[in-house]
Image (spheres, grey):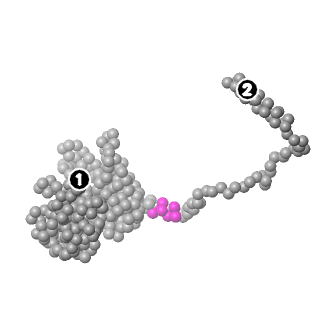
Amino acid sequence: MKKSIIVIVSVLILVVLVSCQFLPDINFKPTTAPTQDSLPNPQATSAPQIVVNAEDIATTDLILTSLYEQVNPGVVTIISYTSLGEGSGSGFVYDYDGHIITNYHVVQGAETIEVAFSSGLKVYATLVATDIDSDIAVIKVNVARDELVPLKLGDSDALQVGQMVVAIGNPYRLTSTMTLGVVSAKGRVLDSLRTTEDLTSYTAGDLIQTDAAINPGNSGGPLLNLAGEVIGINRAIYTSGTTIEGEAVNSGIGYAISINIVKRVVPFLISEGKYDYPLIGISSSSTDLTLSQWQQISDTVTSGVYVMTVTTGGPADQAGLVGGSQPTNIQGFYSGGDIIIAVDGRPVKVYGDLISYIFKNKSPGDVITLTILRNDKEQEVDLTLGSR
């Protein structure tokens, strides 16, 4: 390596000498180092300056910390002991009578229910009633009134997509955990825990989608707006995998039962021990159809509730609604069904719109007017809602 370097240097020196021999007679003057003023001053491009308002940050911090201090005493940890072992979830105080709201699946099959308050108090609870359609349960504790901090219920219909929300609960037994996110969407649907005789799941509707971190153990806990009002009960997460321990992995898609459904259901659970949901008697896609699917069923619309099947003898069948029955070039997809485009004059674009309206506003025995397209011709159909 040293020999190579020497050769290169020698050659360079030779080149310099040869070059000097052929230079013209020039009067060389000593050069001076350039001054700072003589250097070019290029205008470097940079990202726009981010202006941070310290007062806004302080205000946001104060809102969040105050919310936690106000709400956390009303959030509880629930441990259910079953014949298969124990599981944990969350809940929140509903009233000064000791009623606590949680998910049905948190206390499902429980022989003993334990409730732990943020104060450190632990007591046993009794099961009052359950709603397996929306996955709601009411339990009750017998404690001193000053231990009970009922949370204020908000209005989930007033929520806006993008609005900030927080979840407080007991993920992985990490009690009193608070997470922050936004409302990602409204009016989502999931499969209900109730099934038909042929084991087909009914639909749970009017769910709030959020990206606030919800993990196993958060179930049953409150989803709150920044005013500290409960606007949902955290129910489930969408997941595509599990941890080494077999727990579901959070994907940033969580679901909460809207509080307006809770406000409608819970008083019946406490007073009557049950709640009857209205029944339409159809099946449809829980997600919007693709354009290629719409092209199979209509020449005029690309949104609405497509009636895939009609339950024999059910309310929709009695009202004369028709499900898809004609094979298409899409495997398993049938054309010829009615398309519901409005209910009681209110437009519906997806199945969730229809279910949310029915669940929040109607009861079994009520009559609704459906605007449908049949062979792309509009007509109205009156339907008397049944009961699940």
- Residue plotted at (57% across, 62% down): 51
Q: CA distance from mark 2 to mark 1?
A: 82 Å
Residue 47, magenta (yes or no)? no
Badge 1 density bin: few <14, some 14–19, many ≥20, Cα 10 Å: some
Which picture quadrant has residue 136?
Answer: bottom left
Is residue 221 placed above or below 383 in the rendered structure?
above
Query: Which residue matches tag 1?
Result: 105
Is residue 268 placed above or below 84 in the rendered structure?
below
Figure quadrant of the N terminus: top right
Location of residue 269 in the rendering, given as x and y in whole percent from the top left corner: 19, 63
- Residue plotted at (82% across, 33% down): 18
Which picture quadrant has residue 320?
Answer: bottom left
Q: Which mark is residue 7?
A: 2
- Read off the magenta span: 56-63
Location of residue 356 in the rendering, given as x and y in whole percent from the top left corner: 26, 67
Let me know if residue 121 appears in the view: no
Which picture quadrant has residue 313?
Answer: bottom left
Question: Disc count in the image?
Answer: 2
The reply to whether discs 2 and 1 touch (Cβ–Cβ < 8 Å) is no
Residue 60, magenta (yes or no)? yes
